[in-house]
Image (spheres, grey):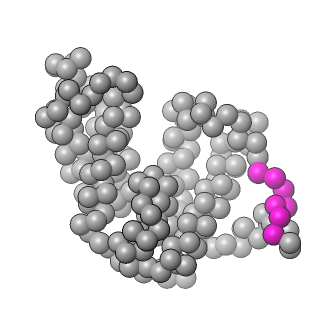
């Protein structure tokens, strides 16, 4: 598969790579990073062993390229009250003593869910509903596996601000996924 078919398969994944990059970069750099990913794959086709899907391999390369861009940009995250996200919806999730008011919807088998392409469409939809600040912090922590200290350093925010953004992002994603994926499938 390391010939013309390989090149065609790479080009076929370009739209997915651009979409993934746009979710995390929030800039025009997404097109460039996707192209750099394809170029890196073309320069080292032997790096693809076939143990995972081609898309998984390419997204692995893309993640490293995105992290490089994030580190170069060193954008500041300045939150306005509106961007910080409304947490009033979260109040209904908890009792006064901090316990769940209602248990989260049963998410079934997470491994099986991750095999369904439709899930990623819903996840993209939910990620796009987050404020840019929440989406960026969530992506850096949960997708790119940055440590909290690294996120704070890169985005010039405090650890408590980072924790609040992560909490709000997780809660909003939980609500969105419960409503748009898991409750629909129950």
Residue displayed at 55% across by 35% down = 114
The answer to which of 151 and 54 lies nearer the viewer is 151
Q: Is residue 176 left or right of residue 142?
A: right
Residue 78, image x and y in percent?
42, 81
Residue 27, image x and y in percent?
30, 61
Q: Main secondary structure of the magenta part?
A: loop
- Give the quadrant of residue 185: top right
Q: Is residue 27 left or right of residue 106?
A: left
- Give the quadrant of residue 86: bottom right
Residue displayed at 83% across by 64% down = 99
Residue 77 appears in the picture as rendered: no
The answer to whether 54 is drawn above or below residue 93 in the figure is above
The answer to which of 180 and 144 lies nearer the viewer is 144
Q: Quadrant where the C terminus lies?
A: top right
Magenta span includes 63: no
Magenta span includes 102: yes
The answer to which of 125 and 32 lies nearer the viewer is 32
Residue displayed at 49% across by 55% down = 142
Residue range in magenta is: 98-104
Residue closest to the far left: 43
């Amino acid at each position: 598969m390391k010939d013309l078919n390989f090149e065609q398969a790479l080009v076929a994944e370009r739209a997915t790579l651009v979409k993934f990059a746009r979710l995390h970069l929030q800039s025009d750099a997404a097109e460039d990073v996707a192209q750099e990913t394809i170029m890196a794959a073309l320069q080292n086709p032997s790096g693809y062993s076939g143990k995972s899907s081609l898309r998984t391999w390419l997204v692995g390369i893309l993640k490293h390229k995105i992290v490089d861009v994030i580190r170069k940009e060193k954008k500041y995250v300045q939150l306005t009250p509106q961007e910080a996200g409304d947490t009033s919806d979260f109040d209904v999730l908890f009792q006064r003593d901090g316990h769940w008011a209602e248990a989260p919807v049963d998410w079934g088998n997470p491994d099986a869910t991750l095999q369904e392409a439709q899930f990623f469409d819903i996840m993209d939809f939910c990620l796009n509903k987050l404020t840019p600040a929440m989406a960026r912090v969530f992506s850096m922590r949960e997708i790119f596996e940055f440590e909290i200290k690294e996120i704070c350093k890169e985005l010039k925010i405090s650890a408590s601000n980072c924790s609040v953004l992560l909490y709000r992002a997780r809660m909003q994603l939980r609500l969105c996924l419960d409503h748009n994926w898991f409750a629909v499938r129950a």
